[in-house]
Image (spheres, rainbow, N blue to C red):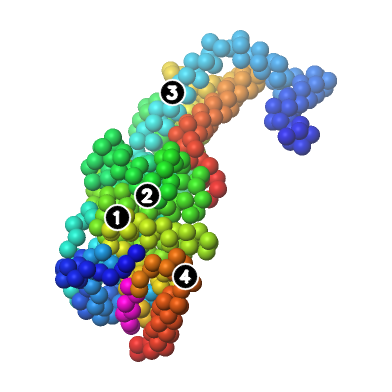
Amino acid sequence: MSAAAAPPPLLVLAGTLALWEVLVRASGTPPYVLPAPSLILETLASDRAILFPALLVTLGATLQALAAAVGGGVALAVLFAQSKWIERAFLPVAIVLQVTPIIAIAPLLLVYLDSREATLACAFLVAFFPILSNTALGLASVDRNLVDLFTLYGASRWRMLILLRAPSALPYFLAGLRIGGGLALVGAIAAELAAGASGKGAGLAFRIVEAGYRLNVPRMFAALLLICLSGVAIYASLAALSDLLLGRWRDVLARR
Amino acid sequence: MTEALSAATLAAPPLASLRGVSKFYDNGVEALRDVDLDIRAEEFLTLLGPSGCGKSTILRLIAGLEAPSAGGLTRSFSAGSVGFVFQEPTLMPWAKVFDNIFLPLRLAGQSRGKAAPAVEQALTLVGLGGFQNAFPNELSGGMKMRVSIARALAPRPSLILMDEPFAALDEITRFQLNDDLLRLRRETGATIVFVTHSIFEAAYLSTRIAVMGPRPGRIAAEIDAAAPRETGNFRASPAFAALCEAASNALHRAMGEEAP
């Protein structure tokens, strides 16, 4: 593939940043309006004592919530697969939670929970649904003939789940996980924003709000950069996990 | 191959026996009406009929995947000794060929090591020795179907049920698999119940053809097809032509006299 046919994304990114740097310098825009990329990187280095602990807080909450969403989503999806009655009873609740914007639920959660727990709860709530719905879809979309075959050979429900439904659902689950991973970060950030100034154990979103009050725009950008990189890292590692688990089977799905 | 079934075989109790079997589905469709049919040991019985005449339903009833709505069904084979081949290969795409064929043995509680010889033997029987580690998507349509047949053969079933297994394949592959199927039957001695809507396939393979009529499905005629097949090319012989004609006429009558 030639560079002319498809411009590599890194080239586009570098070009954009270079243009940004040049425009800011040429127009003499003050840093409290728009900092140049170089200044943002400088701020990232100089404010690392504030920003990196905040990064760890946000990432920690995101990953814990994602792990809980995987556990809860998969468990509920397996329950749904066992009984239509359970699915009919619980799916509406899950959907209501999903369609209500998390940013509107966060203040209420903060009434009942401390800010750390509320962050976890928000991130869990948004990551949970895509994992649940994708896994449930995967468990349900099993080849009917294979189900007949397992029945013919006297397979128990449990073995059918392990040997047939789980591998059938794996690609669906991984797709849900990739969506859920990104959303968990969104949920954690939303809760941190709603929690506002609660000082101790503050995450990146809190640092953004705080820097905003002080008109420290370069730090706002630096924190935003870290959030952005976290999102990319989460997506990339989940995509790598997906490739690893699906291996050669991925070709099959691509051809279907 | 001589197709005359021994007197002892004819006297033995049938592997499965349907008496006045009817089948209704919840949506009101009457799939089968008053079907009488015996599956005799060692025969190659073909259910021949147009689509939607309940051929597959009979197979599913024999397999125990569905229960009759009315009538009696007795089966004298044990639960583990029946194999099923679907119209599609129905392989697990995430599992290698070995694991696909190992499946029935695994579900019967055998260990991987202990089952390996049986799996390899089944693969050799269908002419796919050495393909254990391939994934299904790396195989052609005909090869996938062979794997599907090998899976049915692996537990050494006394009865194999085949639901239009070659319908989706091209004619050259189908002829080849037809020949292989006859050879497999000779080598394993399994009883086969085969569903098809191809008159030629039915005439080529069967020792007995049950011609079915549609709506509601019923057995309209039975044709004894146990003609001697020593001739090198049975497909070009007068006996084959006569069988095809008989089956074709029976099918026409079955289609013409649709039940009220």
**Relative to B39, A191 lies left or right:** right
Discs 4 and 1 carry the same chain letter: yes
The subunit letter for the residue under badge 2 reads B
Discs 1 and 3 carry the same chain letter: no
The subunit letter for the residue under badge 4 reads B
Residue denoted by label 1? B188
Kindly identify which numbered label has been placed on residue A39: none
Cα–Cα gap, marks 4 and 1? 23 Å
Discs 4 and 2 carry the same chain letter: yes
Amino acid found under the numbered disc labelled 2 = Leu
Camera-nearest residue between A72 and A120: A72
- Which structural element holds mark 3? helix
Cα–Cα gap, marks 2 and 1? 9 Å
What range of the chain is rendered magenta? B219-226
Residue for point 20% across, 67% down: B9
Neighbor class of circle 3 (other Cα within 10 Å; few <14, some 14-19, many 20+) is some
The subunit letter for the residue under badge 1 reads B
Residue denoted by label 3? A60
